[in-house]
Amino acid sequence: MSGRYTNLSMQCPQSALLHQGQGKRTTMAATTELAYFTFPNRILFGIGSRKELRNELARLGTRHPLVVTDRGVIDAGLLEMAFGRIGSLTVFDEVEPNPTEANCIAGLAVYRARGCDGVIGLGGGSSLDAAKAIRLMSTHGGSLADYDITAGGPTRITSNMPPMMAIPTTAGTGSEAGRGTLIQLPQTGRKTAILSPFLLPSVAICDPELTLGLPPLLTAGTGMDALTHAVESYLSRSLHPICDGIALEALRHIAKGLEASVRDGSDLTARWEMMLGALMAGISFHKGLGIVHALSHSLGSEGRVHHGTLNAILLPHVLRFNRPNCEAKLADLAGQMGVGRNEDAPGHLITLTELLLVRLGLPQHLSQLQGLHADQIPTYAERATKDHCMATNPRTATQEDLERILRAAW
Ligand SMILES: [Fe+2]
């Protein structure tokens, strides 16, 4: 058989760059392509799963882990909740929102000074991403910019890394099942993606009880990040039908849990739905994301702007731009969101994403976010054109297109 050979490994970042054109197909047609399908890391999911934490650490052979987290997690009592007794645990709790390289270097210094032999990321996306960067730097030389995905970085990342456990305390990032980390770097001047299958956490522990205390606004913002992962990965032009199925199922869980968890943070059923949806959406975006994330990474380089909230504001505008190239897929997504599959399902889906901003109490315009400036729109757009998520968006976009989207969202 002489079919074209395609590597669809979920652990292979390059696979996300395999494009399948911009057609309106929603179901897979028979093809002569061959494909590898490999799945991500060991994941322990469920209410109370944190109680297996020490057994999982023993399984990894880690005796002196560094817990990488932030002050908010400590103040919320989640360190005690996760570990029970803290004892002689080594904790680095200085992770900043949108972590920087300097931030990770500070964590690495603690890792080395205390003779640690493994890393535990405990928190939201920033803590998990910082933990991945510290893990990488503990065995790989140079600076983080050497591992930038847009500069051939993945080829320089080897399996020589200490074990890592990821314990999310938000339902949004999906980083617990992701092969990437996003760090703000001085050399690139932007949030820079570092991707490698070796960066997948050795094990993830996803316990919905750890998200019970998350305030409504953060629940909404992180939840919309998860929703955007499911939507953008399903619309991604990469060929990965397994991830497509996972994205749709993720969206079904998110649709069940999102508003309920914002309305009542103590609703454990809603928290369960969101933690599962966010995890699955994190797996699905192994097939790549799109313009929402390209723009959000660029805008997030400005400092403390919340990633999920940026995505939430940008999503309807990007869907409107993408619509001509993905009508049928938008209808599939609308079906998962309970909008129905009638003639204008794509339009209704876009309206629903706008309505969600209001219903979840999120800002509806970029101008409402501190630290962003309208006169910088061309800079934001230009920086986004260099983002790795541009390649998998269902419709090719120029810098001018991105500027128009940003103006519409302003
Ligand atoms: Fe995201």
Image (spheres, grey):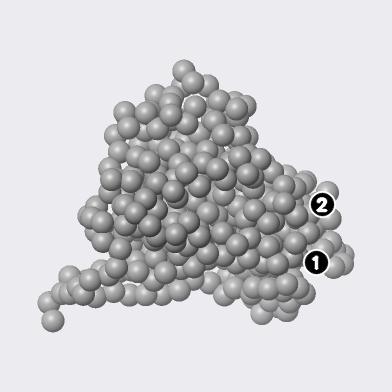
Query: Which amino acid type is shown beneath numbered disc 2?
Result: Ala
- Between the residue at mark 2 and the residue at mark 1, the CA separation in whole angstroms equals 14 Å
Give how far across and how far down residue 181 sits, in percent: 52, 52
Q: Residue furthest left?
A: 2
> Residue at left 47%, top 36%?
298
Write down the residue under mark 1.
83
Q: 152 and 190: which one is in front?
A: 190
Give how far across and how far down residue 85 sits, in percent: 87, 67
> Residue at left 34%, top 66%?
240
282 is higher (above) or lower (below) than 298 = below
Give how far across and how far down residue 187 sits, in percent: 47, 35
How many numbered marks, from 0 up? 2
Residue 360 horizontal side relative to residue 324, left or right: right
Query: Which amino acid type is shown beneath numbered disc 1?
Result: Phe
Write down the residue under mark 2.
76
Tag 1 or tag 2, which sits nearer the N-term?
2
> Residue at left 66%, top 79%?
59
Q: Quadrant of the N terminus?
A: bottom left
Using the rendered image of the protein, determine whether residue 48 is visible from the camera's viewpoint. Answer: yes
- Element under disc 1: helix
Label 2 neighbourhood size at 10 Å, few (<14), some (14-19), many (20+)? few
Q: Quadrant of residue 206?
A: bottom right
Give how far across and how far down residue 151 sits, in percent: 36, 46
In the image, which disc is placed on residue 24?
none
